[in-house]
Amino acid sequence: MRALLWTVGVVAVVLILLGLFIKAVKWLLILGLIALVVAVVMGVMEGRKLRRRL
């Protein structure tokens, strides 16, 4: 699960950076932000699962 979070996070950052470098492609920036939000939400959910196990 941790590898999936890292992958989504890295993809999000790459999409955001591409969106910033290529100003004409605004949808890359939007997709990157959505992916970053998904990675954060998944990370919070995983953290709550780990707390319950302890």
Image (spheres, helix red, strand yellow):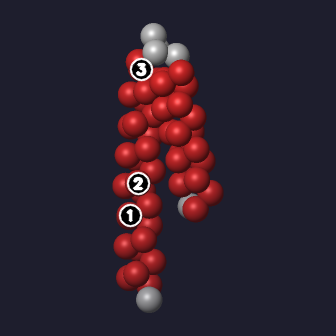
Q: Which mark is residue 40?
A: 2
Q: Amino acid at mark 3?
A: Trp
Residue at label 1?
44
Compared to 51, does 5 lie above or below? above
Q: Amino acid at mark 2?
A: Val
Number of other residues with Cα within 10 Å of mark 1, as a class: few under 14, some 14 to 19, many 20 or more:
few
> Which secondary structure lies at badge 1?
helix
Distance from Cα at disc 3 to Cα at disc 1: 26 Å
Q: Quadrant of the N terminus?
A: bottom right
Query: Residue 35's x, y, as percent?
Result: 44, 40
For mark 2, give the secondary structure. helix
Looking at marks 3 and 1 on the same chain, the residue that comes earlier in the sequence is marked by 3
Q: Label 3 neighbourhood size at 10 Å, few (<14), some (14-19), many (20+)? A: few
Give the x, y percent position of residue 36: 43, 44
Residue sitting at x 58%, y 62%: 2
Screen quadrant of the C terminus: bottom left
| Residue hosting label 3 | 27
Instruction: Assess disc 2: are there few (<14), some (14-19) or many (≥20) residues with their C-alpha within 10 Å of its C-alpha.
Output: some
Q: How many marks?
A: 3
Look at label 1 and name its amino acid.
Val
Circles 2 and 3, Cβ within 8 Å, touching? The answer is: no
